[in-house]
Image (cartoon, rainbow, N blue to C red):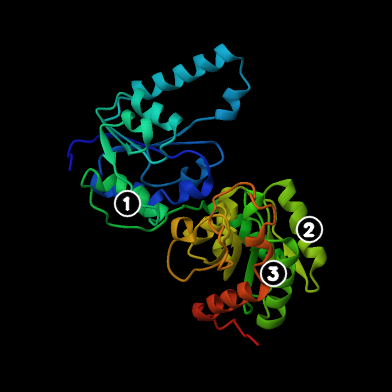
Amino acid sequence: MPEKFQKILVIKLRAIGDVILATPVLDNLAAAFPRAAIDFLTEPASAPIVQHHPALHDVIVLDRRAWAQLPRFARLRASFAFMQKLRDKKYDVVFDLFGNPRSALLTYFSHAPVRVGYKFRVRRLAYNHLVVPRGDRVHEVEFNLDALRALDIPIRTQNLRVENTGEAQTEVAKWWREQKLDEAKPVVGLNASGGWYTKRWPLASFAQLGDRLARDCGATIILLWGSREEQRDANEIARQMQAPARLAPPTDLAQAGALLARLHLLVSNDSGPMHLAAAMKTRVVGIYGPTRPELQGPWGEGHHVVFKAGLHCLGCNGVTCKIKTHDCMQQLEVEEVLQAAKLCLRNAGSAAVQMT
């Protein structure tokens, strides 16, 4: 294992959930190199996830959307300036945990003497230490940690870490009191978002699930949302439910984490909020169809995943449904998800849970 890394860069682009699943890398690097300055490069939506991580010296944001609005030559100048900024930092080692052409180029042009990345197609030429993927059944947390194993860096923890600010916790606690939530009863969040439409269980199914949880478990239902579209979906679920449901307040990522940490359970499509809840040590029932839980399921103990078994197209990883029927979501029955939710609540050992 190299002993003299003083400046380290970790690259993980794109989605919130992807960045959350990379956080064990940061704690292991900090443990192995306690005096090193560790930077993290990601995109604007995901940057708040690591903004307060104690292992980090700096968070570098790559704003692709802002670049896309520039004229062609201005976009090229911005790209070269960004790469020069990375080069000027004189990193000793760069770990590319994303492995797409853009992140591979950033790694290569950093001119770091040690460049670690995955053995994917032409992109592998950007690296001088290759990580050979272990197949298609390795969870993303382990996939990320394999980049450290390539340099014989010891793995001391596999725990997710997202730090909440005291301000976020205070804001959520205030809303909690205003809602007069009875913590003698289970408080269950429902999250109908999912990025791709193919990952979204029907709103009507979420509404039926909320009613069953309220009736059978005495649960208080909180409907989570982020974007305006998700707010409309949450309102539609509330409209269809017979039992009362509360809409979560508008939140930033820190406040969303603080809210999720207070729940007894989150039932969610495969999404960033699902992974954030798992990082907050809240039990999760993850609903899966086009994505594979063995690769991207909720990480940690006490979680459950549900999917419609027996479909030949399960785990297609498609942003559109090639067979046009969306069977993996349409055929997943409320009763299956309900039983997983009841099991999670029962195993939580909460005295609040009274199920029929």
As rendered, which of 346 and 317 lies closer to the eye? 317
Q: Earlier in the sequence, mark 3 or mark 2?
A: 3
- Where residue 350 appears, as percent x and y from the top left, is 54, 80
Answer with mark 1 or mark 2, whichever residue precedes in sequence: 1
Looking at numbered disc 2 in the image, what kind of residue is underneath it? Asn
Q: Position of residue 78 (x, y in %)?
A: 51, 18
Outermost residue toward the top? 73
Residue that mark 3 sits on:
221
Badge 1: residue crowd in 10 Å (few <14, some 14–19, many ≥20): few
Location of residue 278 in the rendering, given as x and y in whole percent from the top left corner: 49, 61
Q: Amino acid at mark 1?
A: Arg
Q: Quadrant of residue 94?
A: top left
Is the Cβ of the residue at disc 1 closer than 8 Å to that at disc 2? no
Evaluate if marks 3 and 2 touch, with contact meaning CB atoms under 8 Å apart: no
As helix, strand or loop, the secondary structure at mark 2 comes to helix
- Label 3 neighbour load within 10 Å: few <14, some 14-19, many 20+: many
Q: Earlier in the sequence, mark 3 or mark 1?
A: 1
Image-quadrant location for residue 178: bottom right
Residue 62 location in percent, x, y? 50, 30
Q: CA distance from mark 1 to mark 2?
A: 43 Å
Instruction: Using residue 314 as the reference point, say whether residue 332 is left or right of it.
Output: right
Residue at the spot x=67%, y=66% of the render? Answer: 331
Mark 1 highlights which residue?
134
At 72% from the left and 67% from the top, the residue drawn is 205
Viewer-side residue, 274 vs 60:
274
Q: Secondary structure at mark 1?
A: loop
Answer yes or no: is residue 272 visible.
yes
Residue at image point 17% right, 39% down: 3
- Which label lies toward us, 3 or 1? 1
- Name the residue tied to disc 2: 235
12 vs 160: above or below = above
Q: CA distance from mark 3 to mark 1?
A: 40 Å
